[in-house]
Amino acid sequence: MPLKVLISGAGIAGPVLAFFLHRGTSASITVLERAPAPRTSGQNVDIRGVGLEVIQKMGLEARIRAAHTGEEGIRFVNSSGKTTATFPAPDDSSKQSFLTQEIEILRGDLSEILLDATKDDVEYVFDEYIVGLEDVEGAQVEVTFANRLPRARYDLVVAADGMVSKTRRLVFGRGPDDGDFLNYVGQYSAYFTIPKGPRDDMWCKGYLATKGRMVFTRPDPHGTTKGLFFVTKTDQKAFEPYYRAWKEGEGAQKELLRKEFEDAGWECGRILDGMMRSEDFYYQTVAQVKMDRFIKGRFACLGDSGYCPSPVTGMGTTLGLAGAYVLAGEISQTPDDIPGGLERYQTTIKPLVDSSQKIMPGQIRVFATQSSTGVCLLQWVLRLASSSLALKLFDMLGSSGSTKEKERWKPPVYPKIQ
């Protein structure tokens, strides 16, 4: 009998896992997505190092490069819009950059490419999710669904449904102190689409304001602009209004950000107006998922659900791609021994997880400047970083999780999925 595999999450890591499992096994694969339709929105994601190797193995590099946002780099500006520091995008994925990478693509565009590459070989079920998981004597997992799918048994169940994974919670609970295995790094963020303004071009614009506030606008290939707000604080208690808004929903979140950024300067008025009207608004705490073990029996966490490194590291997408490749590779080697394959998956990917989650002490705090003097100092540092000292400073401030990760960790060779 072929394996029956259930994957919760049709974003990025889930479809990549399905792709390689189909290539290397005869498994029957179902991918669930809680949303009623494929998610077409989302912020920029970048692919680097081992992530690039994975999409090359999939034969999708050309399609993904063709969907590049076109972002040429990042320019930091002051309140009058004058450029204070410029960081061009690298022309090689092995080179470091402050923000823009060689391959920048919107999350929704990448998800669409992956869905298209797997839709003929994998069953996708939207508007559905898991509400119950029960181990059946170690031989299978019995799954109960929320909506229309009947209860069924699977040989392998994988959670690939994000940082705050409800599927993970069914197996591992809420973790220490009921914290959902989240390690907060001291930031909240929001992403949304706004109309393209007269001064928006193919450069990302970054603006630093007092009170730990940062604003970015980024180009996209669809004739609009992506807006991003970040708030950084050193005292976690100061985030209590943000946490409440997280629980209360989009209306409360937008209103909180409107009040936070209305006096920030630069083009925040225009960006806030666009945010209030946006239909793809996404708000989150910036955090890492820290789990000693992300497997149990015939269940595994994949990508952000098991080891989210946070946007601070820039390694989220790459780590999800690598994890999907390794998990599929290990299962393809011993499809009759799922628990053994999962143990090897845990052992193999954990070193990359650990290195990708490293954040240099003070890396977050440096952006929590509260005063105008602090903002001026930070602008001076960025101006210096955009000089010949850039690469060294990027390694310290901008890419601690990804620095030379390709040299530290090599993806194994799995003959059945090459």
Image: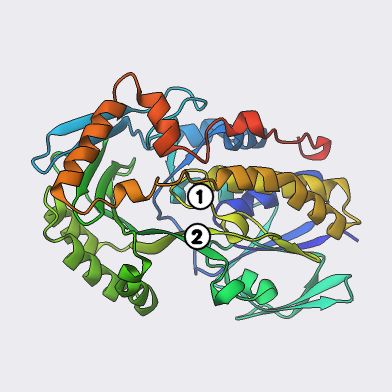
The one of 113 and 180 positioned closer to us in this rendering: 180
Q: Residue at x 48, y 52 (%)?
A: 310
Question: Where does residue 317 sit, x and y in percent of width and height?
Answer: 53, 46
Q: Nearer the viewer, residue 366 or 204?
A: 366
Question: Residue reaching furthest left?
Answer: 80
Q: Which residue is mark 2?
A: 38
Say which label, 2 or 1, has the lower sequence index: 2
Amino acid, disc 1:
Glu
- Residue under the point 80% across and 73% down: 141
State the image coordinates of residue 305 (x, y, percent, origin top left). 59, 61
Question: Would residue 20 be seen by someone viewing this image from the given angle?
Answer: no
Residue depicted at 56% across the width and 30% down the height: 404
- Identify whether 284 is placed above or below 170: above
Quarter of the image where the C terminus is located: top right
Q: Position of residue 161 (x, y in %)?
A: 57, 63
| Element marked by disc 1 | helix
Asked whether residue 247 appears in the rendered view, the answer is yes
At 39% from the left and 59% from the top, the residue drawn is: 186
Q: Nearer the viewer, residue 130 or 366?
A: 366
According to the image, label 1 marks what residue?
Answer: 112
Location of residue 232 (image quadrant): bottom left
Q: For the residue labelled by badge 2, is the local secondary structure a helix, a strand or a loop? A: loop
Q: Is residue 282 left or right of residue 55?
A: left
Which numbered disc covers residue 211? none
User: Is the residue 388 above or below the residue 10 in the image?
Assistant: above
Please say if the residues under marks 2 and 1 sit with CB atoms less than 8 Å apart. Answer: yes
> In the drawing, does residue 192 fall left or right of residue 107?
left
Q: Amino acid at mark 2?
A: Pro
Residue 304, horizontal then vertical, whole percent:
56, 56
3D distance between C-alphas at marks 2 and 1: 8 Å
Up-down relation of residue 116 to residue 83 (above or below): below
